[in-house]
């Protein structure tokens, strides 16, 4: 028996689907579940109704989840921070183009980051605060999801190919247990155009997941990882459950769970017993 989750409580849509496929269904506050013996193509449902549908994974025990680890830019938050920093010096189009190619895996992430950070040389460090206050917003459902995990004593973390200024502020804001990102080199409150220390790339994200598992003495099978870009793939593949959030094609193709229309709080639907 397979279970499909409709990440919406729209009963009209649910009845149409249940009648068409001859499914049994159960209504919950935030979602609807269908029960079936055959496999169907969920992409057809997603595109037709513009809401999220997922199979309830059989390989992952949600009640034993011990760690949730998230990418930051365009996953936990609504922007690519480096693009918005560049906007203050009129270079957003150039930087955004490089960012997009890196997220699609078309160019090497490390090289792309070094190239973009060089363009920020000479910028006042105070611009980061302006980006945080004026541009950065948590994605829909982020605060609710983290609160949900904290109530279940599930550890939470953010890891990013972006910058520590933003990951640290977000971690403090919503109560994440861990954060890790790149450290922008600053001299006399001016960006030098360099990264200080090791670049947080795809391998570093994977390593951080493993580091947290080791630190908390938990199996990777009890980890949920979420991301949207090519540099999240190693981390997602390491986790017991991978989630693609409004993601690039490569990530969607490899993830266990796909959220293309709803907010981060849709992850909570899987925990209903």
Image (cartoon, rainbow, N blue to C red):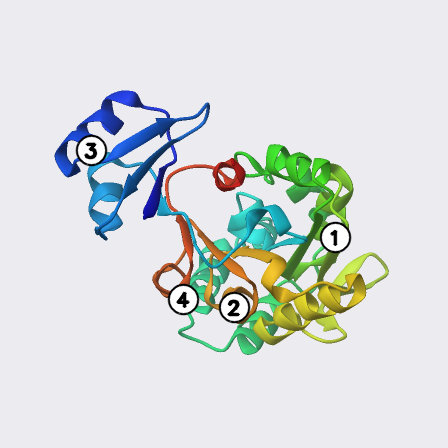
Q: Residue at x 39, y 35 (%)?
A: 7
Instruction: Identify the residue position indicated by label 3 in the image.
Output: 17
Q: Earlier in the sequence, mark 1 or mark 2?
A: 1
Residue 154 seen anywhere in this rendered image of the structure: yes
Between marks 1 and 2 in the image, the one whose residue lies nearer the viewer: 2
Q: Which residue is mark 1?
A: 165
CA–CA distance between discs 1 and 3?
46 Å
Q: Measure how far apart labels 4 and 1 are at the Cα level.
A: 25 Å
Disc 4 designates what residue?
A: 104
What SS does tag 1 mark? helix
Tag 1 near tag 3, CB within 8 Å: no
CA neighbours of label 3 inside 10 A, class few (<14), some (14 to 19), many (20+): some
**Location of residue 22 by image quarter:** top left
Q: Earlier in the sequence, mark 4 or mark 1?
A: 4
Residue in the foreground of this view, choosing between 258 and 154: 154
- Is label 2 in contact with label 4 (beta carbons under 8 Å)? no
Residue 47, image x and y in percent? 23, 43
**208, 172: nearer the viewer:** 208
Distance between the Cα atoms at labels 2 and 4? 9 Å
Q: Quadrant of residue 118?
A: bottom right
Dots 1 and 2: beta carbons under 8 Å? no
């Amino acid at each position: 028996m397979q279970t499909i989750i409709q990440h919406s409580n729209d009963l009209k849509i649910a009845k149409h689907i249940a009648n068409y496929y001859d499914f049994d269904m159960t209504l919950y506050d935030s979602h609807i579940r269908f029960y079936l013996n055959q496999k169907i193509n969920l992409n057809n449902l997603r595109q037709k109704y513009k809401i999220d549908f997922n199979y309830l994974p059989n390989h992952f025990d949600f009640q034993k989840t011990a760690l949730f680890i998230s990418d930051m830019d365009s996953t936990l938050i609504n922007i690519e921070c480096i693009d918005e920093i560049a906007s203050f010096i009129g270079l957003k189009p150039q930087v955004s183009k490089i960012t997009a190619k890196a997220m699609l895996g078309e160019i090497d992430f490390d090289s792309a980051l070094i190239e973009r950070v060089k363009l920020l040389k000479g910028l006042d460090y105070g611009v980061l605060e302006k980006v945080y206050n004026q541009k950065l917003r948590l994605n829909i459902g982020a605060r609710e999801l983290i609160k949900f995990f904290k109530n279940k004593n599930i550890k939470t973390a953010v890891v990013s190919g972006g910058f520590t200024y933003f990951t640290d502020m977000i971690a403090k804001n919503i109560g994440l247990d861990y954060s890790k990102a790149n450290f922008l080199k600053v001299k006399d409150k001016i960006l030098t155009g360099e990264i200080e220390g090791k670049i947080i790339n795809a391998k570093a994200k994977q390593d951080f997941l493993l580091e947290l598992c080791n630190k908390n003495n938990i199996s990777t099978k009890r980890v949920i990882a979420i991301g949207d870009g090519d540099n999240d793939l190693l981390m997602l593949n390491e986790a017991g459950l991978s989630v693609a959030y409004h993601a690039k094609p490569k990530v969607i193709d490899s993830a266990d769970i796909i959220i293309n229309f709803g907010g981060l709080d849709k992850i909570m639907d899987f925990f209903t017993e």
